[in-house]
Amino acid sequence: MIYFIIYEDILLSSSIYQSLIHQFLGNMKKKNYCIFSCQNYQDFTHLHSENLDGIKIFIFDVEVPGKSGLDLAREIRLHGDIYSQIILLSDFEHYQHSQFTKRTLALDFLSKKASDFNSLFLETLNTAYSYSTEHFCFSFLSDGDILQIPYQNILYFEKISNDNLTVLHTIDRTYSICSSLINIEKKLHQDPRFFKSHRSCIVNLFNIDAVNFHDNTIQFKANQEPLRQLISRNKRHALRKKLTDNQIFL
């Protein structure tokens, strides 16, 4: 699921952004998305406290009274979310684009008074969507829909008895994927986050909390119990080196 979270106190402006999002994703025939509109900080706080499991693209007006969009963008980054895309909007063209994008790691800063605002907004949406889904998500087909799981939520892929079926374990649930582990390995082979620690398992190195090489168990972040049978004997040295080289833990 992809979430678009709009922070804009003017309802007409929010409606325009929503229409453009529907237009953009409708042209791409994408169904797995949801739009939330917040007019004040209380609405945003209530929404942001929910567990939105998926890609998030924030669209913030920097002049909302009280807590501005800039304040929210800084909060998001300070809380450790460096992956969600942030688009900043303003009525004032004199704001320094580079100043705000650098401070908040925002994708772009758009003037709402630009004559070609709609086309610029659609172009920025395309960049945000492409960057989020291609660089930060694992995509697969499920019941006719394309699911996109952020890499940061993935723990490991596990081959089961059926060679054409793989189980994806994430922080909060599991998915069955109609694909062999070999094909998934080919898709991920250039990604430094993933390592085939066993012939039937590919782990996300960045979500490993601890490894016990004596009993070959892996403790993942957000998991209570160490998991066995995820490391083969001949992969122990390579796994230790990967973790050390990436400075995940020593």
Image (spheres, grey):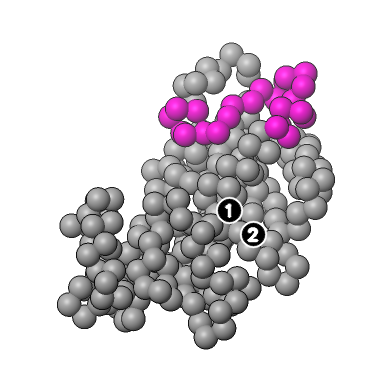
Label 2 secondary element = loop
- Spot the residue most to the top: 94
Give the magenta part as a residue range: 101-123
Q: Quadrant of the C terminus?
A: bottom left
Q: Quadrant of the N terminus?
A: bottom right
One can see residue 55 in this view:
yes
User: What residue sits 52% from the left and 34% below the top?
Assistant: 106
Left or right: where 226 falls relative to 61: left
Nearest the eye: 237 or 144? 237
Question: Which three-letter amino acid code belongs to the residue tagged 2?
Answer: Met
Which mark, residue 74? none
Residue 184 falls inside the magenta stretch = no
Where is residue 237 shown, x and y percent of the image? 22, 65
> Which residue is labeled 1 in the image?
55
Label 1 secondary element = strand
> Which residue is labeled 2 in the image?
1
Q: Tell me, yes or no, whether the two marked residues, 1 and 2, touch with CB atoms within 8 Å.
A: yes
The quarter of the picture where residue 225 lies is bottom left
Q: Alpha-carbon neighbours of circle 2 within 10 Å: few (<14), some, or many (≥20)?
A: some
Residue 116 falls inside the magenta stretch = yes
Nearest the eye: 246 or 116? 246
Q: CA distance from mark 1 to mark 2?
A: 6 Å
Check the image and report above or below for 93 versus 106.
above
Left or right: where 240 falls relative to 170: left
